[in-house]
Amino acid sequence: MCGIVGYVGNRPATKILVEGLARLEYRGYDSAGLAVAHRKALRTTRAVGRVDDLRAAVGDDESPGRTGIAHTRWATHGEPSERNAHPHTDAAGRIAVVHNGILENADELRAKLAAEGVALRSDTDTEVLPHLVARALDGGSPSLEEAVREALRSVEGTYGLVVLDARHPEELVVARNGSPIVLGLGDGEMFVASDVAALVRHTRQVVFLADGEIATLTAAGYEGSRLGPPTTVDMDDADFDLDGHPDFLSKEIYEQPAALQRMLAGRLDARFATARLDGLHLDPRELRGIRRVTFLGCGSALYAGQIGAGLVEELARIPADAEQASEFRYRNPLVDPETLYVAVSQSGETIDTLAAVEELQRKGGRVVGVVNVIGSAIARQCGAGTFLHAGPEVSVASTKAFSSMVTSFALLALLLGRVRDLSSAHGSRLVEGLRRLPDAVETALESADEVEAVARRYADARSMFYLGRVRGAAVAREGAQKLKEISYVHAEAYAAAELKHGPLALIDAAMPSVVVIPDDELLSKNISTVEQIKARGGPVIAVTNAEIPDGLADAVIRVPRLEPELDPILLGVPLQLLAYHCARALGRDIDKPRNLAKSVTVE
Ligand code: G6P
């Protein structure tokens, strides 16, 4: 969840590092720092706050050094402060380290180092690393790589790290165990980062490190014993531009039609009224053998999974559920060989989801990934699944990846349904609906002005309810999540019928309710929910594709009708816009909400 950048080559490193960090800021943003080697000495600059604060701290006094490392931090060990910001160095100021992950035996190692007389200068787990590397070098390690290897032998935990030795500025050593590290291959220069976002400005040729790998980078290339061949990433720097939008969240909300188009490309089979998901590597017989589907994810990926479970039950008529990946890994789950487990993750790096995948695989479970970032840990660990192709999602709150996830589950449900009892007529209807989905999302986005007006009216609320039944219930959950994340307004999602079993007591004129009303067989029930709230003086915002009585709700936001199974995607769009415009009305930092990070790679 922190970001790492490193450079070795023949250009001054500082600018490259700072620009790279800016690309990674969405991974963590409470402090930042860099170290550049020049004339056998390190120049280290660290700052609390954003990458711009680091840029200001560097000022015009830039080191001419051509090798350096940098980091943007999201605090785990130790408060956000300059002394806790990375890079951390050894006592002599020779070795600098940037690190993502958590060293679990850091307290023990810190105590040992302190007992040996080492003065520790931060509260972090990371700081032990430069001291251990320096000690290994002093003890006669023949190379920096060997010294890093030796240091890593005494640590337990996860890391993606880059090490710089002031006396050997011609090289960087990188290592990975549980936190992503990717090398970028330049011409006479090498880059390293925790995320390809920081690399694509310079190169699209990358090498992903696997767990346990260590490599040495020089301007001429890289060496490591078990590195795979380079791959070409299919994104470029323009994918990380705002493209005229005030923030990435807005850009990503409006990119949804194009993202869904990419998700669906080549995956709709009109002839056989089914979906093609070749990446699952499951033949029809294996698909038929699946007795249950369990989705695993965190945050929005979990809510997407809940919608997916509904779709699988509805279309394939096999039991399906969605579970918090974080709970699954610790509760000694019953792993069933006839269940298809689906690990859902935009980043492909969420540690809880990754750990759930590993636990499943240890127990012989069959797990596929639904992931956006190609080359990510979950994608690699699963080895099979569906890529979302939503393009880079930079804003912390997920929008286009969420819609793409749900769309991919509609495809999965269709595929599972069609090897069972789903008729070809029903399949055709869905294939056609999915084909029209991107345009329908485009139309749903036209509600933006109305939603903005509603947001202005209700953004001052201290709390809001989000209510829905069945198809609308998971939509409500994700809607509430969006509002909490980016506007900091408390929101609680409820299955609408549960309202009268307690929460109705909270309804008054100051508590708006957002009611999700699909045009389905539960329409009249949802209308009576609205009436119950109105009778108690609560304001209601209805989000619907149904005909509802005039004057029923205080505000009505309409989305187009498509196929009922796809309602959750369309009804979700105004809820993204509502959260967005509430956050704007409240002047929030939309792309980087306080305390959150885009991908949570620590527990
Ligand atoms: C974090 C983000 C959420 C996201 C969740 C899962 O909590 O703030 O927006 O939904 O992680 O992320 P993933 O990359 O696994 O989908």
Image (tube, grey):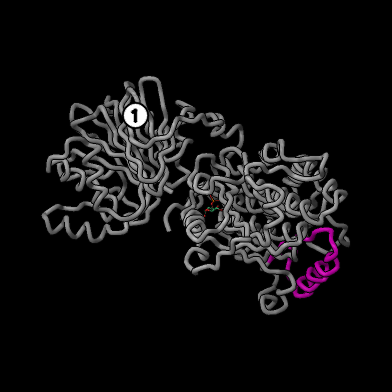
Front-most of residues 297 and 23: 297
Residue 113 horizontal side relative to residue 457, left or right: left
Residue 226 horizontal side relative to residue 541, left or right: left
Residue 524 shown in magenta: yes
Identified at 36% across, 20% down, the residue is 188
Residue 419 is situated, as x and y percent measured from the top left of the image, at 76, 52
On the question of residue 31 being in view, the answer is no
Identified at 22% across, 46% down, the residue is 150
Residue placed under numbered mark 1 in the picture: 222
Front-most of residues 348 and 531: 348
Residue 516, placed above or below residue 230: below
Front-most of residues 54 and 350: 350
Q: Which residues are magenta?
A: 512-541
Residue 243 horizontal side relative to residue 57, left or right: right
Identified at 67% across, 52% down, the residue is 286
Residue 364 is situated, as x and y percent measured from the top left of the image, at 52, 59
Decide: few, some or many residues near mark 1? Use Cα within 10 Å; few <14, some 14-19, many ≥20.
some
Counting every numbered tag in the picture gives 1
What is the three-letter code of the residue carrying label 1?
Tyr
Is the C terminus in the top left, top right, bottom left or bottom right quadrant? bottom left
Identified at 40% across, 50% down, the residue is 74
On the question of residue 248 being in view, the answer is yes
Residue 134 is situated, as x and y percent measured from the top left of the image, at 17, 43
Residue 479 horizontal side relative to residue 95, left or right: right
Residue 63 is situated, as x and y percent measured from the top left of the image, at 27, 28
Front-most of residues 397 and 173: 173
Residue 76 shown in magenta: no
Badge 1 marks a residue whose secondary structure is strand
> In which image quadrant can residue 506 be found?
bottom right
Residue farthest front in this picture? 285
